[in-house]
Amino acid sequence: MAKSPNWTREELILAFNLYLKLPFGKMHKGNPEVIELSQLMGRRTPDSVAMRLTNFASVDPYHQQRGVKGMDGGRRQVEPIWNEFIHNQENLVYESERILAEFRHQTIEELHPELVFDWQNLQGEVRERVVKTRVNQSVFRQMVLKTYANQCAVSGICLPELLVAGHIVPWAIDAQNRLNPENGICLSNLYDKAYENGLICIDTDFKLLISRRLKEESAKSFYQNFFGRFEQKSISLPNEYRPRKEFLEFRLERFQE
């Protein structure tokens, strides 16, 4: 049997792109998304794609702590891509989406039609910057929603159309952790808006806090229905990439109880 050719950089980045979007338990050869990627590549079997996904898990510090190990040869191939991600997250994530679009014979606009409205009237460098930002935010949302199994961490709402990948430390403040899933919480639009505006907060024990401003509305029915009953209750936590406590502390320091 002829030996399979070495993986190209583009193939490795495509596998990395899928790794970001799949829960660990679904990185197997029978997953339709794994099969689809193998067909897209044209020369990789679902089994070999699944093996590369496991290789990425073996160099991911979160899964390393869980004891996930990969074969040495595979690890050596994916480590440069992982290290590039650590040091240059935004560029590599965007490049992975651009390569995915190319393999599908699409433009980045066709790959992300839901975002085109955000940049359709822009031109030049401004357009390029906005396209990159919106595409990366879209990938971040996919990462966070899959981590939380498509459920709001406060209310349990499970309609993706109503869910947001909320940043703990805002996008504009910490460029290094913009795409770090430990800096994200899956929230419905209501709780994301309340979180962004300092009306609620989450402490380092993962319990929900309510601001003085919001408590001024405690006599109204909406308060108990949507906020009061969750006060001091733990949010639902994912099995992987739980909110990092130093990020939660950043919010707490600015929260007015």
Image: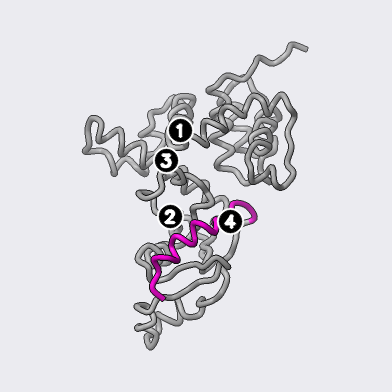
Q: Do the CB atoms of the residues marked 4 and 3 lie less than 8 Å apart?
A: no
Residue 140, percent from left and from top: 47, 46
Residue that label 2 marks: 169
**What span is in magenta?**
239-257
Q: Which residue lies furthest to the bottom in this view?
A: 219
Secondary structure beneath dot 2 equals: loop
Residue 240 position (above or below residue 99): below
The answer to which of 48 and 20 lies nearer the viewer is: 20
255 magenta-colored: yes
Q: What whole-number distance in Å separates the C-alpha atoms at marks 4 and 2?
A: 14 Å
Residue that label 1 marks: 97
The answer to which of 234 and 37 lies nearer the viewer is: 234
**On the picture, is 55 further left or further right than 220?**
right
Residue type pointed to by label 1: Glu
Residue 166, percent from left and from top: 44, 56
Q: Earlier in the sequence, mark 1 or mark 2?
A: 1
